[in-house]
Amino acid sequence: MLTAPRPVVRAEHGLWALERVLQNHGFPLVAGADEAGRGACAGPLVVAAVVLPAGKRGEVPGLADSKLLTEKAREQAYDEVVRRALAWSVVVVPPQQVDRVGLHVMNVRAMRQAVSRLDPCPSYVLTDGFPIAGMPAPSLAVWKGDRVAACVAAASVVAKVTRDRMMGELHGRFPAYEFAKHKGYSTPEHMAALAEHGPCEEHRFSYVNVRAALIGQDVAS
């Protein structure tokens, strides 16, 4: 049975170093998993998993942690990732499920689901930040993985672009909150709209600021 290597990372490989180490130790299909929307108080939690091919084809131009890229650069990186990837998947967790089950529990479940949906199945999995038990392959949690591992960065881009597009669609349904601008995060503009209009069905009612706005609307009425 293959065991997980202790990575010896070569700086010259940059963002692709961890994958190169794992591939050289007998794990040819390395998946990365990451989420978008964990800190938002409205909209879905979106988790993505990606397996990039080895070699030059897997070296996606402009790939980086999605939070470090402009919207245009993220869209370009997204197009390249989905075109080049050996496999990729997305799991969308609606806010109602986040409220009912809990954010962390749903994040962990969605990570497992996203990786399990990959075809071909990965031989190793890298996750961003914290370990996930029950993966279909050996796994390793990488601190700031979206900044040090290409497959995790690719997953962060796919998750972020997918979620941003969904928030743009929600903006059309609920224009008063301007979801297209802040993507459901607790910006001053969002909090002002929440205080004025109260929460909509796409808000996470388990969050303190959303509950406070709801109570404020009840008192005002």
Image (spheres, rainbow, N blue to C red):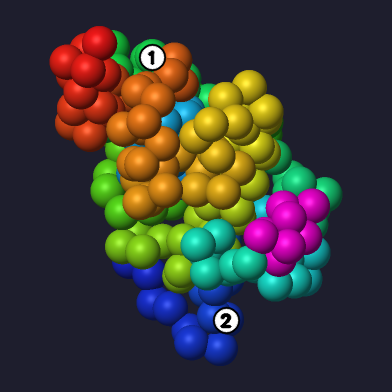
Reading the image, the residue beneath label 2 is: 13
> Is the magenta region chiefly helix, strand or loop?
helix
* Percent x, y of residue 92: 53, 25
Q: What is the span of residues highlighted in magenta in the rendered image?
A: 71-79
Q: Nearer the viewer, residue 119 or 69?
A: 69
Q: Amino acid at mark 1?
A: Gln
Q: Which residue extends farthest right?
A: 83
Circle 2 Cα neighbour tier, 10 Å, few/some/many (<14 / 14–19 / ≥20): few
Q: Is residue 163 above or below residue 202?
A: below
Q: Is residue 155 above or below residue 217?
A: below
Q: Amino acid at mark 2?
A: His
Q: Secondary structure at mark 1?
A: helix
Quadrant of the image containing the C terminus: top left
Quarter location, residue 203: top left
| Lower sequence index among marks 2 and 1 | 2
Q: Secondary structure at mark 2?
A: helix
Quadrant of the image containing the N terminus: top left
Q: Nearer the viewer, residue 205 or 144?
A: 205
Would you say 203 lies left or right of 114 here? left
Would you say 102 lies left or right of 190 here? left
State the CA–CA distance, disc 2 to disc 1.
42 Å
